[in-house]
Amino acid sequence: MFRIFPIQEESVHKRYAEACGAEYRSGWFAFGMMDAESGQIMGMSQFEIGEGAACISDLRAKIGTEDVEAMFILGRSTMSFIESVSVTDCYALPDAAEGKLLTMIGFRPKEGKDLLFCDLTGMFNGHCSGHAVELK
């Protein structure tokens, strides 16, 4: 089992970014994922929320590890938080995570943009509104 939590301390944020090979982004939101039994770092997400839109810069597993299902849950947890503050336009940097993972959590190329896009409208209301994905 694992635990996903908002990272609120700068030192913890830096430690997670380093462990996951991500650039530390001061002032950005971050979620950490840790093994519930051992307390070991498993992964992190970093994102910012602006006026009506959010951007995920990182969705990374700890260097040297891979757990697609856990990373899927971390990605969707991040997106659920973004939607919970009434932001439905969600972008991701193309290198925020492996392309397959970004596609699995709902991102698609947006014409005319270098960013990937996901409309979070209805994604977390219990019906998925066409956002269903198949884990492979």
Image (cartoon, grey):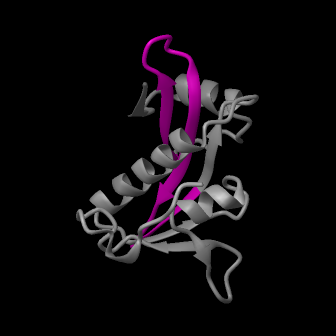
32 within the magenta span: yes
Specify whether 48 is left or right of 58.
left
Picture residue at 53% right of the left edge, 52% below the top: 47
Please state, as top left, top right, bottom left or bottom right, where the C terminus lies in the image.
bottom right
Specify whether 120 is left or right of 93.
left
Q: Main secondary structure of the magenta part?
A: strand
Please state, as top left, top right, bottom left or bottom right, where the N terminus lies in the image.
top left
Relative image position of residue 92 (x, y in whole percent): 60, 64
| Quadrant of the image occupied by residue 40 | top right
Picture residue at 71% right of the left edge, 76% below the top: 114
Relative image position of residue 78 (x, y in whole percent): 44, 50
Picture residue at 67% right of the left edge, 30% below the top: 62
* Residue placed most toward the observer, 34 or 81: 34
- Residue 116, above or below 65: below
| Quadrant of the image occupied by residue 56 | bottom right
74 within the magenta span: no
Number of labels in the image equals: 0
Relative image position of residue 83 (x, y in whole percent): 33, 62
Q: Which residues are magenta?
A: 28-56
Specify whether 55 is left or right of 5.
right
* Residue placed most toward the observer, 57 or 109: 109
Relative image position of residue 32 (x, y in whole percent): 49, 33
Q: Residue furthest bottom?
A: 112
- Residue 36, above or below 14: above
Specify whether 63 is left or right of 43.
right
